[in-house]
Amino acid sequence: MFQKIALIGIGLIGSSIAHAVRRNGLAQTIAISTRKPETLAEAEALGLGDIYTLDPAEAVRDADLVILCVPVGAIGAVVEAIGPALKPGAILSDVGSVKRHVIRVCGPHVPAGVHFIPGHPLAGTEHSGPASGFAELFANRWCVLTPEPDVDRDAIARLSAFWAAMGSNVEVMEADHHDMVLAITSHVPHLVAYNIVGTVADLEADTQSEVIKFSASGFRDFTRIAASDPVMWRDVFLTNREAVLEMLGRFLEDLSRLQRAVRVGDGPALEALFTRTRAIRRSIIDAGQETSVPDFGRPHEPAPILMPGSGNGENKRD
Amino acid sequence: MFQKIALIGIGLIGSSIAHAVRRNGLAQTIAISTRKPETLAEAEALGLGDIYTLDPAEAVRDADLVILCVPVGAIGAVVEAIGPALKPGAILSDVGSVKRHVIRVCGPHVPAGVHFIPGHPLAGTEHSGPASGFAELFANRWCVLTPEPDVDRDAIARLSAFWAAMGSNVEVMEADHHDMVLAITSHVPHLVAYNIVGTVADLEADTQSEVIKFSASGFRDFTRIAASDPVMWRDVFLTNREAVLEMLGRFLEDLSRLQRAVRVGDGPALEALFTRTRAIRRSIIDAGQETSVPDFGRPHEPAPILMPGSGNGENKRD
C-alpha cells in the first residue's frame, strides 16, 4: 500500500501501527524515530521496524506516509524539524487526541505538496511504551480523520484505506467537532477518573490500605483510566481547554442535580436516571464497541491471595 | 458447615452464594425465597436450591443461616416478616452495600437468641438476576461483616468461616466506618459514573449516535458501572446519604481545583496528579484486587462490524 512509512514516536499507538502494518503487509519499509535513545533501542530490540534513527528528518526522507505518534504538546516542534525533509506528495498524519490544536501548530510547517491529514484512532489501553503495542488494537475501533476542506480527496481516500486495512472504521469529521465529541466521550471521563483517584489518594493516609483493599467495589475501574500516560493526558487538557471546560460544566450541572436528589432523598429521580443509563450501555454493546461479558471478561478465577494474614479478620476487634 | 441455609432474594449475589455453597458443600439444604413468582420459577429452573417458596417465613424455618439478598430498601420489611419464624441460635446476615441503615431497620425485628451479623461481600458485576450468578464471584474478594459489639463471637467466627470457604477474605468492621469507606470506594464512583452517562444521554439527541460510536475512547468504562441494578443503587443513595454527601463534597472540591488547572493551563499540576494516580492502580494490582492485563483482559479480537456502511466515512463531506 505504501513504499515507506515513517513513525515518529513509538509508544502504545506507534508500536501498534508497526505491528498492524507488518501483519497486514501495508508497507515495504517502516522507519522509526523517537526522542529517547533507550526507547529507540527498545523498539529495535522488539524488531518493530526496518530503520531506526534519532533524527526524525532522516526517518521521513522518501516516506510516502508519515505518522506522528508523539504527545500533542510535542507535535509542533516535530513538524518544524521534519518539514523540509518531507517528500512532495507524501501524506502527513498524526494520532493525537486533540485536532484543532494540531492543525494550528503543525499547519504553518507543512510544505506545499504534502497532504496534511490529522488523524485520531479511538483505541488504546492503560499501558504505554513500545512493548505495549499489538496488531489488533485498532480492530473494529474508529479512526477519525480531520483534514481541512482544501485537502486532496485522493490522499484522504488512501489514508482511510490504510486505517481500514488495520481493521478500523474510518470517519471524516471537522476538527472542532471532533474536539467537542471527544471532550465528552474521552477527555472529561479521564479527568473525572483522575480526579476521583486523586481524592482517594488523599484519603489514603487516614484510612490506610482500606481503599486499595476494597477497590473491587467500583473504584478500581476508575483507576484503569487514571493509569493512562500522564504526559499525553496533560497535553490533551492543555490543548483542548475550551471543549473540556464546556463539557465539564455540563457534567457539574448534572452532578449538582444528582447531589440534590441524594440530599432530599428523591428515590424516583435516582431510579429513573439509573435505569436510563443502563440502556446506553446496551447500545454500546449493540454497536460492537464493547463486550457484553460481565466485568469486561475480567478473570474471576481464584487468584493467589497476596496479602497474607489479611483474611479472617474477625479478630480485628481484639 | 450448615444444615440449612435460607437465601431471601436470588439476584446476582443470592444466586452466586447458591452456586458457591453447592460447589463447596457448605450446606445440606438451600431454601430460596423471593418476592416475584417469575424470579422464583427462574431460580428453580436453574436448579439453584432445594426448597422454593414465595413465603420468606417458610424458607427460614429451621435454617441455621439466613442471608438476606434483597435491596437495602426492602430489608426491614423482610426481617419483620421472618422474625417470628427464625430458629433460636440461627445466624441472620445480609449482603447490602450500606450497613448502619440495615442495623437500624432490622435490629428491632431480630428476636433474642438469633445472631444478627450484617455482611457485605465486595463483589459483583454489572449483570443482575438469578441467571447472572457464578460460584467464583467471591473468590479473593473481601467480605465485610459489621456485627454490633454484643454479638456472639462464635457466631461471627462461623459466618467468617462460611465466607472464607466461598473464597472471600473476611474483615470485621464497625458499621459506620464501613459506610464511610464504601462511600468513597464504591458509592461515589457509581454516582459519578451514572452522572456522566446521564450527561452524555442528554447530549445524544444533538450528536446522534456519535457518543455511542466513539465510546471506546474512555466513556464505555463508565457505562459498565452505570449499568448496575437501578433499584439496588437507588436504595444505596437513599440509605447512605450522609457518607455519600461527605465524600462527594471532597470529590467536588478536588474537581474544582482540577478544573482551575485546566482553565489556567497548569501543566505541572496536571502531570503530577496523573502520575500519582498511576501508582494507586499499581497498588491495587499488587494487592490482587485487579488484573494487570491491558483493558482488564477485554477481548481485542477483530469483532464483527455491526454497523454496516459506517466504515470508510471519507465521503461524509459529500
Image (tube, coloured by chain):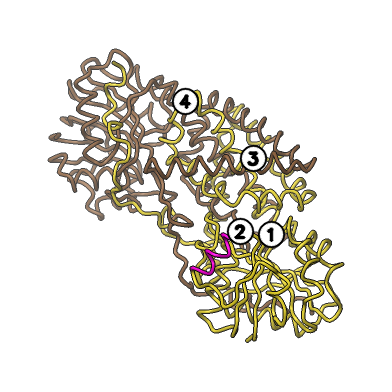
Chain colours: A brown, B yellow
Instruction: Name the secondary structure under disc 3.
Output: helix
Mark 4 Cα-neighbour bin, 10 Å: few <14, some 14–19, many ≥20: few
Q: Please give the label number shown on residue B207.
A: 4
Q: Where is residue A237 in the image (x, y as percent from the top left)?
A: 52, 32
Q: Position of residue B51 (x, y in %)?
A: 60, 76
Q: Please give the label number shown on residue A217.
A: 2
Amino acid identity at mark 1: Ser
Mark 2 Cα-neighbour bin, 10 Å: few <14, some 14–19, many ≥20: many
According to the image, label 1 marks what residue?
A: B97
Amino acid identity at mark 3: Ala
Left or right of residue A169, residue A50 in this image: left
Amino acid identity at mark 2: Ser
Measured Cα–Cα span from mark 4 to mark 3: 22 Å
According to the image, label 3 marks what residue?
A: A272
Query: Does the residue at mark 2 contact the one at mark 1 (Cβ under 8 Å)?
Result: yes
Q: Mark 4 lies on which chain?
A: B
Q: Can residue B230 be seen in this view?
A: yes
Q: Give the range drawn in magenta.
A: B37-45
